[in-house]
Image: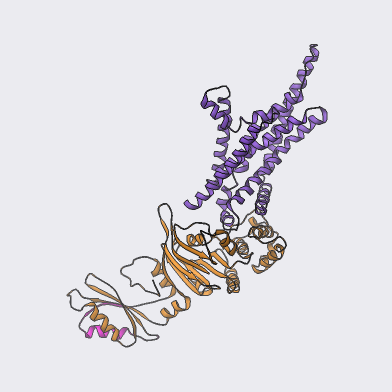
Chain colours: A orange, B purple
Amino acid sequence: MIKVEGLTKRYARTVAVDNISFEVEKGQIVGFLGPNGAGKTTTMRVLTCFLPPTSGKANVAGYDVLANPMEVKKRIGYLPETPPVYPEMEVAEYLNFTGQLKGISSGDIKRRVDEVLGRCAIGDVRSKLIGKLSKGYRQRVGLAQAIIHNPDVLILDEPTSGLDPKQIIEIRELLKSLAGDHTIILSTHILSEVEHSCERVIIISRGKLVAIDSVANLTNRLRGSEAVALEVDISDGRPNAGDVQQRLEQVSGVSRVLMKESKNGRLQFEVESLQGRQIRSDLARTVVNAGWNLSELRAVGLSLEDIFLQLTTGEQKDQPKTEGAVQ
Amino acid sequence: MKNVLLICQKELKGYFASPIAYILMAFFALIFGFGFYTATRDMVRFSFQAQMSGQPMTMNVNEQIIRPLLGFASTVALFLIPMITMRTFAEEKNRGTIELLLTSPVTDTEIILGKWLGAMLLYLCVLAMSMINVAMLFAWGKPDLQPVLVAYLGLILQGGCLLGVGVFISTTTKNQIIAGGVTFFVCLLLWLLSWFTAFDSSVSAQVVNYLSIVTHFDNFSKGVLDSKDVVFYLSMIFFSLFITSRAMESLRWRA
């Protein structure tokens, strides 16, 4: 439904989005995750034909955003970060306007307005001025505007910001009920958001794609098992990296050994265990028995939160990095 | 076309939901009314004096009231137009609603035309205020209708150009005050230029004079409908809306 290839968006001095490629299939809910300034909004703006890409291709619902913007625009619903509402309009009047703007015929418009008023639970404020509404209500009016023409693709920039917990749950339910017929991309910097409502996650940081995987994969893989950061001192040049790696892999219960880096005469590894296995003591014994100097050994807690932080906060040399289902 | 009307309707609602439309109309009615009062009083006074001195003068309502009055109206309009156009795009950009317009299946041209048309209709409402006074002249006098209509046509065309320029300036910023200020400055400049070049016959002065939107109103105010002026105004309207669409396009690429 959405296909992005080598998308780059360069502003005067900065590169906001750097060579991103991904695909989203029909009916999926995809979470677009990244810290502030990662390029989420820019990517979404390209997908909605608000900004042209500097290079690369973006294809939405079978149409290219540069070649056929009108066709794309007909098939998307977009909720920007700040809901694009006119404070001097009443809620129903606003939905009437946006619905017609999106090509709903005047015969259908009333029915559609009533439908989205109900769906977004804003029927009780239908004749209030938008300017008088609270942030949460305004957000929902914005969402109603995005779904009013029943678009194939919904692009939502932080749809739950400014809502109270109850409203957040309602929006999540609403999004889930919309998935299936609609393909949804929602951006957020809140992780639980993604865990709750998305099937797949796209993590970007500083304009670069860091990870794409299903939420289940990301969490399963990293939650059930244990990850251990291990450092061996090789200042006297004795064991070489290959030897150590081989030996570590032979320890029972180890699923994967990753050589991280070698610096200042130290080799850093990251070792993951099989589900439910404790491997720390075995690892320590193995290294010591081999006569090498074990300089560090510690468990790395891996929540989605950590993955996210590590994936998105650049180079932190002294901390082992986690390769999720990455790159 | 449907989209143009939709946006135009939305614009009009925006104007009339805020005090701006009423303020402009009241302000214009007041100033025009004052001008009307002075012009009529002077005419009445002159005609009395002429009769007292036993030298009856031919008095002409068209020449002595309507023409200077509508000329005056064209100058006043120069100062009202920035207040009409300053919000057109600047406000949408500031509120973020421009994202709604630009991601909806409408073309840039439809958006621009809708907004310009909305501004034009408000301008017509403002101009309509002057008809209260002009109608009085028709009720108690016998002015010629045709030159009045021509002058109004001139006012409308001149307004259309300046509104186009104002809409263009509004696309370049998200700050309404800047949009209004710059448009005001441009209008002021046009007005001043028409003064400076009025008695100058050098080639450069003639060129400036020709390009100055204000000077083309002169013929209209005399009741002369010259196709040259009409063509000038229509092409200026087209040109200003054209550069507005270019500006929107470039905004996307630069943004």
Q: In the image, residue A79 lies at what x, y percent? A: 57, 62
Q: Is residue A264 visible?
A: yes
> In the figure, is residue A82 to the left or right of A260?
right
Q: Is residue A190 left or right of residue B210?
A: left
Count every numbered label the image shows and give the total. 0
In the picture shown, does residue B236 fall above or below A301? above
A191 over A279 or under it: above or below = above
The structure residue drawn at horizontal position 60% and vertical position 46%, both measured from the top left corner, is B87
Residue B235: image quadrant is: top right
Tell me residue A106's x, y (percent).
71, 60
Outermost residue on the right side: it is B140
Q: Nearer the viewer, residue A299 or A44?
A: A44
Left or right: residue A270 versus residue A158 is left
A286 in magenta? yes
Quarter of the image that includes the C terminus of chain A? bottom left
Segment tinted magenta in the rendering: A275-298
Is A24 included in the stretch rendered in magenta? Answer: no
Measured as percent of width and height from the top left, residue A312 is found at 40, 67
Residue B73 vertical placement versus A142 (above, below): above
User: Which residue is the extreme one toward the top?
Assistant: B54
Image position, residue B94 (x, y; %): 55, 51
Is residue A160 among the parts visible in the rendering? no
Q: Is residue A271 above or below residue B228?
A: below
Name the residue located 65 percent from the left edge and 37 percent from the top edge. Answer: B157
Q: Residue furthest front?
A: B227
